[in-house]
């Protein structure tokens, strides 16, 4: 049944009935439709409230949408039946149209399928900080077609699920603790054991650095102007910038107090005296 047939059924519904009967029937249809929507809203509210904390936020979000769409579809089918429209033909036409639209929008279908994989694998949840290729942000929602992010400079980003399935995904806040890796150099003249002791003292005094796992100190190798060092610290996932800023400031101040030299590349230029040229 096409759009013209539906319009024809509606005209026949209006022309063949008494105006009073039409008014009463329309009022009844509106009341039933409102009742259907209210019932589905109540089902959505109580079911999601019951499952809160038992399922992930994105699954709760998808459940709400699914119940809402189901209510709209049933209300629409009820309206069609009251108007005498053959809903079986509409559903059949909708199935054929769905196949045609599917072929015409393969990207959307692929994103739809990828959305189910994301929901089943659960690589991240709403509220996680993620990095997808070169985009980093907080997950706002996980839908069947896309994932919405809010970047740290407060931009809204929509990424199709198909793109996510083909990209490198890093969930920054997946685990409760993370590691901060610092790399720097000291001059060849410095006592490396003393440098190590100072770094561990600074880590022990920093309130954002965890005692367990313990910090790691390593000598990475010899460079042109100094010795490369590694210093790894563990912290709770929300304290990244607090630890990084505070520990770098503390290292700089302490190295200056201890007289430790952090080398940098230098270029020495020697000018040769060619003397005076006599004519």
Image (cartoon, grey):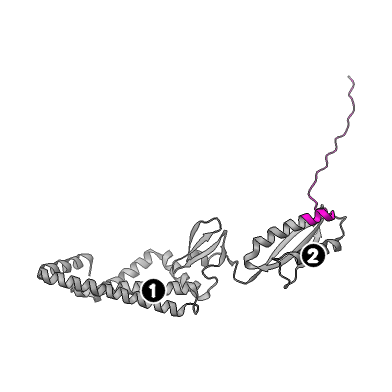
**Image location of residue 221, percent across then percent down:** 81, 60
Q: Which residue is mark 1?
A: 66
Q: Tell me if residue 247 comes above or below residue 142 in the rendering.
A: above
**Image location of residue 244, percent across then percent down:** 69, 60
Residue 201 marker: 2
Element class at badge 2:
helix
Q: Earlier in the sequence, mark 2 or mark 1?
A: 1
Q: Residue at x 14, y 70 (%)?
A: 22
Q: Tell me if residue 153 comes above or below residue 55 in the rendering.
A: above
Is residue 259 toward the left or the right of residue 31 in the image?
Answer: right
The magenta stretch spans residue 272: yes
> Can you see residue 95?
no
The magenta stretch spans residue 248: no
Residue 85 falls in image quadrant: bottom left
Is residue 99 toward the left or the right of residue 89 in the image?
Answer: right
Magenta span main SS: loop
Residue 273 falls in image quadrant: top right
Q: Residues within 10 Å of mark 1 (few under 14, many from 20)?
A: few
């Amino acid at each position: 049944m096409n759009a013209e047939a539906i319009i024809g059924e509606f005209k026949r519904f209006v022309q063949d009935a008494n105006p009073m009967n039409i008014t009463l029937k329309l009022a009844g249809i509106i009341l039933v439709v409102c009742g259907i929507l209210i019932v589905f809203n109540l089902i959505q509210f109580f079911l999601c409230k019951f499952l809160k904390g038992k399922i992930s936020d994105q699954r709760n979000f998808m459940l709400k949408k699914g119940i809402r769409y189901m209510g709209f579809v049933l209300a629409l089918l009820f309206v069609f039946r009251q108007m005498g429209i053959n809903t079986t033909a509409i559903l059949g036409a909708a199935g054929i149209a769905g196949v045609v639209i599917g072929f015409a929008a393969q990207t959307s279908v692929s994103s739809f399928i990828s959305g189910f994989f994301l929901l089943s694998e659960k690589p991240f949840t709403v509220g996680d900080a993620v990095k997808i290729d070169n985009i980093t942000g907080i997950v706002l929602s996980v839908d069947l077609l896309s994932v919405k992010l809010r970047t740290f400079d407060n931009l809204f980003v929509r990424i199709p699920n198909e793109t996510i399935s083909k990209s490198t995904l890093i969930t920054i806040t997946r685990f409760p603790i993370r590691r901060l890796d610092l790399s720097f150099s000291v001059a060849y003249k410095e006592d490396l054991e003393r440098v190590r002791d100072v770094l561990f003292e600074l880590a022990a005094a920093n309130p954002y650095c965890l005692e367990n796992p313990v910090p790691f100190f390593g000598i990475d190798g010899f460079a042109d102007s100094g010795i490369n060092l590694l210093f790894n610290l563990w912290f709770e996932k929300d304290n990244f910038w607090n630890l990084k800023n505070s520990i770098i400031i503390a290292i700089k101040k302490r190295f200056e107090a201890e007289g430790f030299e952090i080398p940098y590349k230098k270029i020495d230029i020697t000018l040769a005296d060619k003397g005076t040229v006599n004519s």
